[in-house]
Amino acid sequence: RHTGSPNLGINTVRAGFAKFPIVLLIWSLMKISVLGGYVAFCCWASRRLESAPNSAFGRRIWDYAWLAGIVLYESLLFILPTRAVLDNDLPLASSMIILMEQVRLVMKTHAFVRSVAPRFFFYKPHSETPVPQPPGFSKYLYFLFAPTLIYQDRYPRAKKIRWNVVLNNFIE
């Protein structure tokens, strides 16, 4: 029915983003689990360095147990948010927020572990190389929000922050 007033589609947008508090809860739980993944990785890395060099079998068991743990974690990070979207019957836009963030977090977690774990695998205790340390939490947190899927300890940065570019990107 034509009423003579413009229809800006606000109701369509409102319907697409319905149940937004549930979206925020699911997103928060996913983010907390990814931060917990960092703690778990640091636990694996530090305990691996503490194990005696003559217990190669024990270290191998430790590594395979953590490998199974990371595979299980990434699988659950795919399954549980998807299940939450289906169980809560979230509309399209709300579902896309959760599912796209889910894929991003799984890729970020995998990239972090894949990039940092070799430092600990290839470390030789009686060599000249320094003992590897897990990256600081601030570096991990920066990586989670940086627009890249490759973890590095340092990223190229401009000498000066161009706030107009930051603002334009934020608005986009």
Image (tube, grey):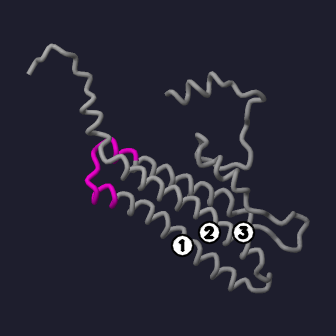
For the residue labelled by badge 3, is the local secondary structure a helix, a strand or a loop? Answer: helix
Q: Is residue 149 magenta?
A: no
Residue shown at the point (73%, 37%) measured from the top left: 156
Cβ–Cβ under 8 Å for marks 1 and 2: yes
Q: Residues within 10 Å of mark 3 (few under 14, many from 20)?
A: few
- The answer to whether 76 appears left or right of 92 in the picture is right
N-terminal of the two: label 2 or label 3? 2
Q: Residues within 10 Å of mark 1 (few under 14, many from 20)?
A: few
Disc 2 versus disc 3: distance between alpha carbons?
A: 16 Å
N-terminal of the two: label 3 or label 1? 1
**Amino acid type indicated by mark 1:** Gly
Q: Quadrant of residue 96?
A: top left
Q: What label does residue 121 carry, if any?
A: 3
| Image position, residue 152 (x, y; %) | 70, 48
The residue stretch that appears in magenta: 83-97
Q: Which residue is mark 1?
A: 69
Relative to 19, residue 133 above or below: below
Quadrant where the N terminus sits is top left
Of 23 and 159, nearer the camera is 23
Relative to 36, residue 52 above or below: below
Residue shown at the point (35%, 57%) measured from the top left: 82
Q: Is residue 92 magenta?
A: yes
